[in-house]
Image: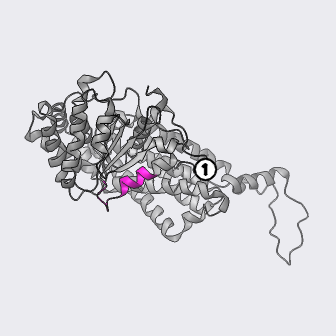
Amino acid sequence: DRAAEEHPETESSSQVKGSTAIVGDGPSAVPAEEQIDDRTKPVPQVVTPQSPIPATSPSPDEEQVVLEDQAKGTPRRQDWLSGAKTTFNVVEGISGTIPVVGSYVGAAAKVGAAIVEIVQTMGSNKETADGLGSNAQQLSDILKLFENKLVDRPKDDLTKIFIDLQRELQGVQNNIERMNESGVLQKAFSAKDRAEELKGYQETIRTASEQLQLLVALNTTTLITELYDKGIREEQQRLLDRLGDASYGARGKAIEDVICLEGTRVQTLERINAWIRNTSTSENVLWIRGMAGRGKSTIASTVAHRWKYQAASAIFHFRRGQNKSDERLVCALARQLGSNNLVPEVRDSILQSIRENQDIGQDRLRDQFQTLFRRALGRLQNTSLPILLIVDALDECQDVEYAVAFVKLIEQFIPSLPVNVKFLLTTRPEAPLIRALEPREWHAEDLDSMAN
């Protein structure tokens, strides 16, 4: 009965389109009109008030080239963008197979892909497009190295490659900040008939900027040291194994296969993004309620997918029939946080808590929550990135008392956690859970009300 959630309905026909991904173009790209050999083709004359009208008019083919250039950038630029986008998509796809540094490489590829789409959307803003395009080409050239077994290279070689990669990411960040401050990026989307496109574009820029902030601040030297130190990796794995099988709570499909279709649930996802970013209030919990088929699980997977490179995040899907997995909820979430090399302070704090209590995987729910969430996350008061814990289909937990107890533990210990720790829960309006959730003044999304 959750099959209907794979493709939720669009909230409203008046919704704006969702944010699109990003990309750029290369510095070597030359506008097509500049490639014309002036020995074989006529050069268009510049007409001023004092100049005679040219004796010949541009050919229909030349007029078409100018129109195409103004509409979407030169054909040569488009060819380069297509090649760069392919590189970014390939590298992001294989990043999961790269130990330790794979998440960093995947996030960098995601940023590159975003820049490419922005440049493609800019159209005739040649100067701005070329600036971002230069960044994207450099990123593409560096990341293309990861298509081969780059991690088999000597440590010094890989260290240099990561220095170049991080330097280029810093350049992208500086370029975007400068263009934002000067209003150049805004002008690219200032036409009245592009208002909807502008909204999606702004979210894309914001997402890319948040990802860049994470990547530029990360100490890649430490990551590379861990990559080449087999002892460190084995110890981390040993500690994580104390929490049990990593497959607990898995959905059975790749998250990107069950996310919202583009243009659907736009307003709901915008509100959720705002809630995640909001650290000025005590709204640490969001619960999404709705009958079967409203799209709760798809929304949860979409949020996890989109925040993969912007936060320390973890997701657990309750499913009927996986009774033995249900009581692994806290351990499964903690294991994902402890495996996240993009946010090492969160990872290290989780590993420290496991090291201090190596039998935590066998303890009661309350002890697990206190050790792996309250203590491990409670000592991260200076972490600015969101720590996002998603629990999907809480109503399908076979042990209703366990589910209700989990809700009560959140209420009890949330005041002692940093404001950037966020719990997102989805559930059907089942009586025991509703009685546990409704009295609490938590942020809520009622999908049934939206449908009606």
Q: Quadrant of the rendered structure where residue 354 is?
A: top left
Instruction: Please say if 273 is above or below 452.
Output: below
Q: Quadrant of the rendered structure where residue 369 is?
A: top left
Tell me which residue sits at (26%, 46%) in the image. 223
Q: Does the segment drawn in magenta span residue 28?
A: no
Quarter in which the N terminus is drawn: top left
Does any portion of residue 26 appear in the rendered image?
Answer: no
Which residue type carries mark 1? Ser
Residue 442: where, in percent of width, then height? 32, 51
Residue 329: where, in percent of width, then height? 24, 34
Instruction: Please say if 266 is above or below 147.
Output: below
Instruction: Please say if 213 is above or below 246.
Output: below
Residue 201: where, in percent of width, then height? 54, 55
Q: Residue at label 1?
A: 14
Tell me which residue sits at (42%, 60%) in the image. 173
Element type where label 1 sits in the image: loop
The foreground one among 83 and 19 is 19
Task: Please give left or right for residue 192 compared with residue 393 in the image.
Answer: right
Does any portion of residue 243 appear in the rendered image?
Answer: yes
Task: Please give left or right for residue 92 compared with residue 418 in the image.
Answer: right
Q: Does the segment drawn in magenta span residue 281?
A: yes
The foreground one among 308 and 156 is 308
Q: Quadrant of the rendered structure where residue 274 is?
A: bottom left
Q: Which residues are magenta?
A: 271-283
